[in-house]
Image (tube, rainbow, N blue to C red):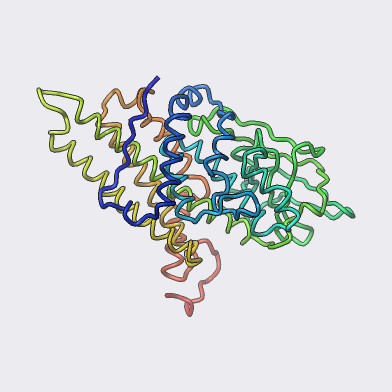
Amino acid sequence: MATDLYVHPDYLLMDELLTEEQKLVRDTARAWVKKEVSPIIEEHYEKATFPQHLLKGLGEIGAFGPYIPEQYGGPGLDQISYGLLMQELERCDSGLRSTASVQSSLVMYPIWKYGSEEQRMKYLPKLATGEFMGCFGLTEPDHGSDPGSMITNFKDAGDHVILNGAKMWISNAPFADIAVVWAKDETGRIHGLVVERGMEGFSTPEMHGKHSLRASATGELLFDNVKVPKANILPGRSGLGAPLSCLDSARFGIAWGALGAAMDCYDQALRYSKERKQFGVPIAAFQLTQKKLAEMITEITKAQFLTLRVGQLRDQGRATSSQISMIKRNNVDIALNIGREARQILGAMGITNEYSIMRHMANLESVVTYEGTHDIHLLITGMDITGISAFSRTEPDLSKMK
């Protein structure tokens, strides 16, 4: 069983910009991951199983809803602490971070922001500890980057509604106790509903055959005339903006998480390059190896400060969706590139499960696609700086061009 030797890279001393609480949150998560997760994650990845026994520990380190106020069972931490937690989880495995960020940003966040007080008290404390697990139903078999075209819908039936439709590629679905589902009412308006396991007509079949995120449970959500009480409809906000605001929170966590994966690949490549000898010297002595490592740490350092700044803006309530799109896209992109370069430094050893690099690379192929693809986030930035939407099929209003 491999020992987790990870050393956190901090080339420009970003730690000096963190509070003592933020560093304590991060270091606590790092110690837990090294002890509880790193020794078993490869086995679960190869078997394509999620280690559900870790859920209680994730709750204990505050990984479920870190920013949820204490009155609802959360730790009440800031956004940078949330990001640091996600960084430490994905430094180990993207699937582990996916489980936590879905629970936090896509289940707890909408209930906290848009739920009734009764809904908050009913669900949030149990979600914070991991007693309840949740999932988020937005993507459909035929509607991914265009969620506004969803066909999942509900109809009024007195004190309840009748929900029909399907959602696909849903993290946590196979074992989730509740699902925050987005569906259209009879006027076509999108609403969030809390669907509970055990409701007749609701099923969550697991998806198999993944070559990525194998240590994360992925499934479908199927609704066949499901009776959902009207008390389970989130009353605080409707329209497509509601689920998209949840994705902002999740994408912010992904940006930090992908950075963690990049750090892990770099750390392994650096250590290996100092130990592996060829032609009588460590391969770290060769110019091309140093070029690879220098470019890795440069991109990691740039991403650290991009991500920290957006975290500061989120804590101030000033971060925009476009800014979050930028860091999600950038950090996943650099993580993929760093993973490939790190694998080359390790040579043949880089493809073995003795190291996590190949697992990171496979996982990141999902991360670069979900919650907004690489190209979609590029176009979000493009729309923000030009004032013209590339998603629109109508003539742009030139008066709004930037």
Q: Position of residue 300 (x, y in %)?
A: 31, 47
Side of 204 relative to 262 (left or right) = right
Quadrant of res 148 = bottom right
Q: Please, which residue is most extreme toward the front here?
A: 20
Q: Is residue 316 above or below residue 100?
A: below
Q: Position of residue 162 (x, y in %)?
A: 82, 48
Q: Quadrant of the N terminus?
A: top left
Side of 198 relative to 221 (left or right) = right
- Residue at the image position 73 percent from the left and 53 percent from the top: 119
Quadrant of res 276 = top left
Q: Quadrant of the C terminus?
A: bottom left
Q: Position of residue 192 (x, y in %)?
A: 70, 54
- Residue at the image position 45 percent from the left and 75 percent from the top: 401
The foreground one among 169 and 312 is: 312
Q: Please, which residue is most extreme toward the bottom here?
A: 399
Side of 381 relative to 226 (left or right) = left
Q: Position of residue 309 (x, y in %)?
A: 39, 60
The foreground one among 146 and 249 is: 249
- Residue at the image position 51 percent from the left and 72 percent from the top: 396
Q: Please, which residue is most extreme toward the right here?
A: 158
Side of 10 relative to 88 (left or right) = left
Q: Is residue 70 above or below residue 316?
A: above
